[in-house]
Image (tube, rainbow, N blue to C red):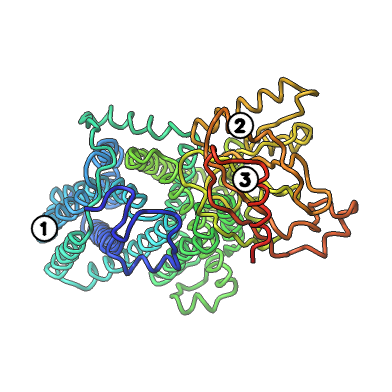
Amino acid sequence: MTAAGETATGPATASARTPSQFRLLAQRRFLPFFGAQALGAFNDNVYRNVLVILIAFHGASAASLPGEVLTNLAGGVFILPFVLLSGLAGQIADRFDKSRIVQAVKASEILIMVLAGAGLATFDLGLLFLALFLLGVHSTFFAPAKYGLLPQILRPAELVGGNALLEAGTFLAILLGTLAGGVLAGSSGTSVIVFALVALAGIGFVLSLAMPRVLPADPQLVIDWNPWRSTLANLRAARESRTVFLSILGNSWFWFCGALVLAQLPLFVRVVLNGTETVVTLFLVVFSAGVGAGSLLCEALSARKVEIGLVPFGSIGLTVFALDLALAAPAQPAPETVGAAAFLQQPGAWRLLVDLGLVGVSGGIFVVPLYALIQQRSRPEAVSRVISANNILNSLFIVAAALFAATALRAGLTIPQLIGVMAVMNAAVAIYIYTLVPEFLLRFLSWLLIHVVYRLRVEGIDRIPDRGPALLICNHVSFVDPIVISAACRRPVRFIMDASIFRIPVLNAVFRGMKAIPVAPAREEPETYERAFAVVAQELRAGQLVCIFPEGRLTPDGEVQPFRPGLLRILRETPVPVIPLALSNLWGSMFSRFDPAPWKRLPRRFLARITLAAGEPVPPEAVSLEDLRERVLALRHQP
């Protein structure tokens, strides 16, 4: 049995090396799960597309409702269980072994597909819609187990890569399932369709049987079988962390934008471009490939940590490329209906495809860090309940996207104008969220600093624990030292800083967003001095990381100055491990005090390689100022 927090290969520690996210596809702890969920997404979309096509061509003859109404009803029937049952699904996923839940869900998929086959064979709309509803139930219970399982089977350094593979695989499965459903509905008999649906469900179930067991996250949890109360309880669990809840809202906003774009693509191609179904397929392939590529890029861009600084990067891309997609739309459709090959020869065709692909890339970069952050920052015993709350809000946002698009188009907006409005709304929503949670924007600035201004090499950063309190100490070389440390560390860090700098206008908003702790000399501002120590003790008792620059000021000559005794008081009041850090190669940069004239420093150190090295934790009872200073010096001079 694999314990929670461990994997089949050993403890889930951040120190384990992770050469590539694709290595996970060769390991039992991930591959069977990945294959089972990908086949499930593929099968869902095969059936849903077959059903939509059958309704479109034969629904009116089998029911008193028009095909358009039945098509929209089908979408509502599938999404209804997410709204009704996600609360219960999240509690069950936290209460029991998630691998067994996945296996039970995959077993039920076989039965659902047999029922769907009976409905297809008789074209009984009642059976077809019942099977669709049960597929929605199937997905409702699968999602919280799926996303809640990742933090249990993956090491912290693998969390972004695992989520990236999951998102890329899901979008690829959705695309291929949609295409396969169209092919099967158009050229295959009912028996072939039924055989394919049941066989794929069976293969997925067999794969799930190879998943290793994991311990329940909260085996003492009492399940509330009332859907309304369980939903409210899960929403309360999601709201325990403000950052997590706003990340869920950001994730749901991605699904709002994604659902809106995907829903408009067929109409965009038919009305704006006068294209055929092959052009629609081309657009779907480009968009889905873009989301997959953006998801897979996240691991490389984030250095295998949960880097929420990528979220603003993704939101900027969503706005820029969606807006350009709207502007690039032709004023008049082609005079004759065009297929994919003819469309590619038209002026502006490649601009449209590049914009659409980059919208997808931006979406992948936007959503993967949010999923990873939700998993990382939620209480381990409540991850699945938080994911279920995410699913509820995602469903509501998808419905809202459909209603918004229908209302906007009915009001007279063209499809390109609708996409342009969405792009502007995305910018407004992004600014609002980053105002509420400045950590997103600050991490973005940190990411830019170490990828554009500098090239950062990190050594031993895994010595900083993934959970629990610790006091970080570091030499003070430049004004951007806190930003560099924040960019390298997987967790938020509370920095102690000089109160006079903290109060600088404009910068004060940044420092408050970083939750910096201002301190002043006791003889000058005794209240500020005492308040700083009280806040530090509070943060450490809450399990946070606090960083102090024990020199007390920026180095005037590039050397490590003597350490001041303030950190000893911190450890007397709140004994926690001390982790020495050392910054190298920042002296002489534009942000140091190497030269009074900043413009004289810029060319010399711009794009320089800088290093942040972390040493072994020191127990609080073994701390001395001179020993810590020697450790920092040794780290600074190590090769």
User: From the viewer's perspective, is 464 left or right of 110?
Assistant: right
Residue type, label 2: Ile
Res 53 visible: no
Vertical arrangement, residue 244 with respect to residue 213, above or below: above
User: From the viewer's perspective, is 599 left or right of 451?
Assistant: right
- Residue extending furthest top? 527
Q: Are marks 3 and 1 in contact (CB under 8 Å)?
A: no
Tell which circle, 2 or 1, labels the residue nearer the N-terminal end: 1
Res 446 visible: yes
**Picture disc at residue 441:** 3
**Picture disc at residue 452:** none
Q: Residue at x 69, y 41 (%)?
A: 550
Residue 136 horizontal/vertical position (percent): 25, 48
Circle 1 sits on which residue?
114
Question: Can you tell which of label 3 and label 2 is closer to the viewer?
Answer: 2
Residue type, label 1: Val
Kind of element beneath mark 3: helix
Q: Quadrant of residue 116?
A: bottom left
Residue 241 horizontal/vertical position (percent): 46, 34
Circle 2 sits on which residue?
570
